[in-house]
Amino acid sequence: MVVLGVWLLRPQGAPLEHDLPAVQPVAGAAVPATEEWRERPPGPERDASLFVMLDALHRRDPEAALAQARDRVGTREQAAVYGLFFDTFARENPTLAVARLAAVPPGPGRENALRALASVWLRADAPAALAWAQNLSADDRAPAMESALFELARRDPLQVIELAPQSLSGPALERTLFHALQLITAADPVAAAGLVRLLPAGETQTRAALDVARGLAVVDPAAALAFVGQLPIGPAQTWALNHALTSWAATAPAAAGQYVAGLPAGAAQDAAAAHLAALLASDPANALAWANSLGAASARDAALIRIASTWAQADAPAASRWASAQPPGPTMTTALGGALSYWLLVDAPAVRNFVSELPASSQPAAAASVAPQLAQRDPAAAIAWAQTLVAPAAREAAVTAAYSRWLDNAPAAARAWLATATIAPELRARLGEAGSPNR
C-alpha cells in the first residue's frame, strides 16, 4: 500500500496555507517508470504512483515534469502536485518560478502553484512577493494574494488588515481579515476590538467578536463588557457575552456572578445566567446559592436547570436527588429530567429504583422523563417497570411515555401489545387514540 498524507486543494472557506502531499512508497520499491502509473486502477493508488513519478522528475528536470503534469494530471486530487512543484521552484529561484507558471493550465493546479509560490516567496522577500501578487491578472491575484497575506499575517497582521481590502473580496477577504484579527487578538485584544467592525457583517465578524470578547475578559473585564455592549442586540451579542463570561469566571467568578445578577431582567439575563451557571457548577453548593440569589424568576430557573444538568455529568445521583427535592413545577421537571438522563447512561437499574422510591409529588415527572429512554432499549421491560409504580399518576405517565416511544420505533409491535395489555380501559382508549393511523 502507498500511504498518502493530505493531498487536496483546500476547499473554499478552509484555512489558507497550502498542504504538500506526503507520499511514502512501499519500502524498497523502485520509483515507477514514466507510464507505470497508467497500469493502476483509478483511485488513490494510481494518484500516488503518478505523484511519485512527477515528484522524482521535477527535481531533475522541471520543464519535463511540468509537461508531463500538463498531459497527465486530470483530477483535483492529482493537481495538488503543482503545489509541491512550485514550493520547490520558489525556494530555489522565485523569478524562474514565476516564468514557469506559463506552463501551468488554469484550474486547481494553477491555484495550487500560485499559493505555494506566493507563500514561499513572501517568507524570503515580502515586498517583492506582494508586488508580484498585486500585479497579477484578476483570476491569479486572489489565490496568490490570499496565500501571501496569510503568511504575512504571522509577522505583521496590522499590515494585512490594511492591504487585504485592496486586493481581495468576498470569502477570501473575510478569511484573510479573520486570520489577521485572530493573531492580533492573541497579542492585543484591546486593539483587535477596534478592528472587528472592518469585517463585513455576518458569520465571520461574529466569530471574530467572540474571540475578542474572550481575550478582552482575561485582561480587562470592563473593556470586554463595553465591547459586548456595542454589538447589535441579538445572538452575536449573547454569544460574545458568554465568551467574555467564560474567561472572567475562570479568574473572578464572584465578580462575574455579580455582573449577571445586575443585568436587566429578560432573555439576555436568562441566557447569561444559564451560561455562567454551567461554569460555576463544579462547586454545586456555591453555584446553587448564587442561582437562588437571582432576583428574576426566569434567570433563577434557567440557572438552576443548567446547574443540575452540568452537575449530573460529574455526579448524576447527587444532582438527581437535589432536583427531586425542589418544589413541583416546570423547573423541577426539567432539572430532574436532565439529571436523570445522565444517570441512565451509567446505571439504569439505579435510576429505576430511585424513581420508584420518589414521593408522589415528584414521581410523575421523573417517571415520564425516564420511561421513553428505557423504552428506547427495551419497550416491553420499560412498560412492565412503569406498571410497578405505586402512584397512579406516575404509573399512567410512565406507561403513556414508554408506549409513545415504542409506537414511534415499532408501531406494529406496540399496537400488538396494547391489544392484549392488562391496563385500565380508560388508559387503553387514550393510548389507542394516540396511536391511531388517522391522527
Image: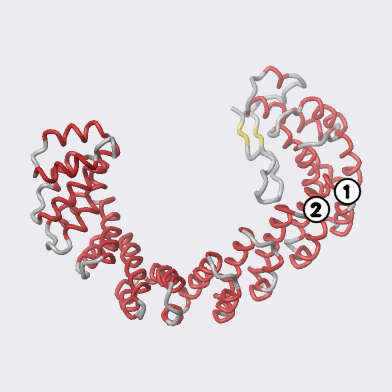
- Label 1 crowd bin: few (<14), some (14–19), many (20+), radius 10 Å: few
- From the viewer's perspective, is 79 left or right of 295? right
Q: How is the image coloured?
A: secondary structure
Give SS at disc 2.
helix
In the rendered image, the vertical position of residue 276 relative to residue 61, given as above or below: below
Considering depth in this image, is 37 or 221 the residue closer to the camera?
Answer: 221
In the rendered image, the vertical position of residue 133 relative to residue 292, given as above or below: above
- From the viewer's perspective, is 163 left or right of 420? right
Measured as percent of width and height from the top left, residue 259 is found at 46, 81
Q: Which residue is mark 2?
A: 145
In the rendered image, the vertical position of residue 404 relative to residue 197, given as above or below: above
Give SS at disc 1.
loop
- Badges 1 and 2: C-beta atoms under 8 Å apart? yes
Of the residues shown, which amino acid type is indicated by label 2? Answer: Met
Q: Which residue is mark 1?
A: 136
Please name the residue shown 26% across and 55% down the image: 343
- From the viewer's perspective, is 46 left or right of 112? left
Measured as percent of width and height from the top left, residue 436 is found at 25, 37
What count of labels does the image hold?
A: 2
Residue 407: which quarter of the image? top left
Q: Quadrant of the C terminus?
A: top left
Q: Which mark is residue 310?
A: none
Of the residues shown, which amino acid type is indicated by label 1? Answer: Leu
